[in-house]
Image (tube, helix red, strand yellow):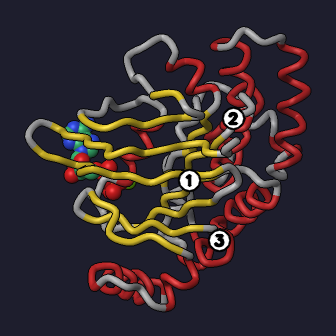
Amino acid sequence: MTDTVLKFDHVVKRFGDRTILDGVSTTVQAGEIVCFIGPSGTGKSTLLRCVNGLETIEGGNILFEGKAVQAKQRSIIDVRRRIGMIFQHFNLYPHLTALENVMLAPVVVHGEDRKTVEERARGLFEKVRLSHRINAYPAQMSGGEQQRVAIARALATNPHILLFDEPTSALDPETVGEVLAVMRDLAVEGRTMLVVTHEIRFAADVGTRMVFLDGGKIVEEGNPREMLAAPKSERAKRFLSTISNAAH
Ligand SMILES: Nc1ncnc2c1ncn2[C@@H]1O[C@H](COP(=O)(O)OP(=O)(O)O)[C@@H](O)[C@H]1O
Ligand SMILES: [Mg+2]
């Protein structure tokens, strides 16, 4: 019995005649926290979007819990329920309160009972330390609070994997820590997570693996601490020196 949650098998993604993902292969086991790093425009967001069928792929396969993700099939609804996605810009519904944002998908998309969902949602607000903000609207919250609502929303369908796409890149520096703290809690719970991030300290402390993408390919992957201390490839070395310079 294997605990493989996600398998990328020679994934090719093109936009027009541009090849964005050029044969990406890697496997994610349950409980892994895989941090993706790489230059802007290298296909990190596209890779995450392919996992829950927001993009089609032109070659290879993505297997989620052993089944091929088929972007255009009805089964994608069940796949999406098991995959929680957290975006850089939160993407909360502005006309709904925090609580309503979290309850929306389970109640409206998946037809779950309102009372059950509300109880679960309240528990999730506790988890993201926002019980006092459940009736606030997105515009009344800080970026860090909105992102924590977005995390609660992603958790509301009981996902088996969480995909974070630069979750702290749009935040004021003083709220980055509160979001990373919630992500650390999720890691400690044993959640399986894919995290695109430039927060290399988070990757070193929490990540179980680091994957460096460049030119649509995995150039290097390995233990985050080892990779940060001594990247093997010249390209990873160059990239890591630019982001660690920027952080100082
Ligand atoms: N819907 C789209 N149509 C055409 N090109 C796209 C689309 N989405 C992304 N791209 C291009 O694909 C490349 C990879 O984008 P992206 O995955 O967002 O990179 P990253 O997240 O690593 O910065 C970029 O050159 C981007 O312009
Ligand atoms: Mg991106």
Residue beneath disc 2: 159
Q: On residue 174, which mark appears?
A: 3
Which quarter of the figure has residue 84?
A: top right
Amino acid type of the residue tagged 1 in the rendering: Leu
Pointers 2 and 1 in contact (C-beta within 8 Å): no
Say what secondary structure mark 2 lies in.
Answer: loop
Residue 231 at x, y percent in the picture: 41, 85
Q: On residue 2, which mark appears?
A: none
Pointers 3 and 2 in contact (C-beta within 8 Å): no
Residue 29 at x, y percent in the picture: 62, 51
Please tell me which residue lies in front, 70 or 83: 70
| Residue 140 visible here | no
Residue located farthest toward the front when viewing the structure as drawn: 1
Residue shown at 90%/16% (left/top)? Answer: 115
Say what secondary structure mark 1 lies in.
Answer: strand
Residue beneath disc 1: 194
Nearer the N terminus, badge 3 or badge 2? Answer: 2
Amino acid type of the residue tagged 3 in the rendering: Glu
Please tell me which residue lies in front, 114 or 41: 41
Residue located farthest toward the left when viewing the structure as drawn: 17
Residue shown at 33%/52% (left/top)? Answer: 24
Residue shown at 34%/32% (left/top)? Answer: 55
